[in-house]
Image: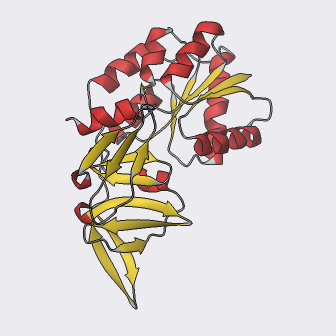
Amino acid sequence: MKALIIEDELLIARELKYKIEMAAPDVEILEILPSLKTSRKWFMQNPQPDLLFMDIQLSDGVSFDLLEEFSLDCPVIFTTAYDEFAVKAFRNNGIDYLLKPVDLDELTVAINKCRQYLGKTAAVPDLKKLLDIISSKEPTGTYKEKFIVHFRNGLVPINVDQIVCFTRDNLYYLITDKGEKYPIEYESLEEVEQILDPNLFFRANRQCLVNIHAIQRVVPNENGKLSIYLGEVYQEAIDISRDKAPAFRKWLDR
């Protein structure tokens, strides 16, 4: 069985590939594609795979577009974060949905479900119906409102609206609007990103998540990249890649 991974976070993609190899050694990963642009090019030059692993929100758009544009009918396993309503929509249409980080046992079940579709023992998922359901309802959810951090001999609650950014520098930190820097007990920024309101926080790069209300200046660079500045509390420039810049502009200009 030949499979394709569409995921814009390389570390997540590599971890998923490793877990797929553990869960189903017979599944061959053809390629890891990091964007809509590269995915479109791939599908124009290759037949569709037997199985597709797709993150929904990519740096340059939403992966649902590929399903419509290329009329894909292969089994799909989505790996992203949507609300409970949407999760039911995925599973009711015979398409599995895995939360990140992907659990190995759940991944095994999902792959076995796809084998049934390929073996013609189950109906092919109605992707069009799924797209109609998802497009009719914006993803919602309950997002984290405060973080509890260690300070001296006690614990301090920090409201999310006080946080200008989250950074990675050996450890993971949050930085407040007063310039205070506290370590947080999370294993990755991906994990932090999943519990934050995406309307308020943007993943600028692998090292930084920024609060929209903390952004004071955006400077375009000649190479198509952007540099954003958060003022006195965090004076370093935060770089956004050329590929991610359009998504950032759209997120900021609301």
Residue 11, compared with residue 214, is above or below; it is above
Residue drawn at 46 percent across, 24 percent down:
63
Q: Position of residue 214 (x, y in %)?
A: 25, 55
Farthest residue, direction left = 254
Please tell me in which quadrant of the rendered image residue 16 appears. Answer: top right
Quadrant for the N terminus, please. top right
Q: Is residue 124 visible?
A: no
Quadrant for the C terminus, please. top left
Farthest residue, direction bottom = 153
Residue 239, compared with residue 3, is above or below; it is below
Q: Position of residue 104 (x, y in %)?
A: 65, 47
Q: Position of residue 127 (x, y in %)?
A: 45, 17
Residue drawn at 48 percent across, 51 percent down:
190
Q: Is residue 252 left or right of residue 33?
A: left
Number of callouts: 0
Farthest residue, direction right = 26
Q: Is residue 3 visible?
A: yes
Residue drawn at 47 percent across, 16 percent down:
67
Residue 132, compared with residue 59, is above or below; it is above
Q: Is residue 66 left or right of residue 228?
A: right
Q: Is residue 103 left or right of residue 212?
A: right
Residue drawn at 65 percent across, 13 percent down:
120
Q: Is residue 170 left or right of residue 86?
A: right
The residue lying toward the viewer, choosing from 171 and 94, is 171
Please tell me in which quadrant of the rendered image residue 160 appears. Answer: bottom left
Q: Position of residue 114 (x, y in %)?
A: 63, 25
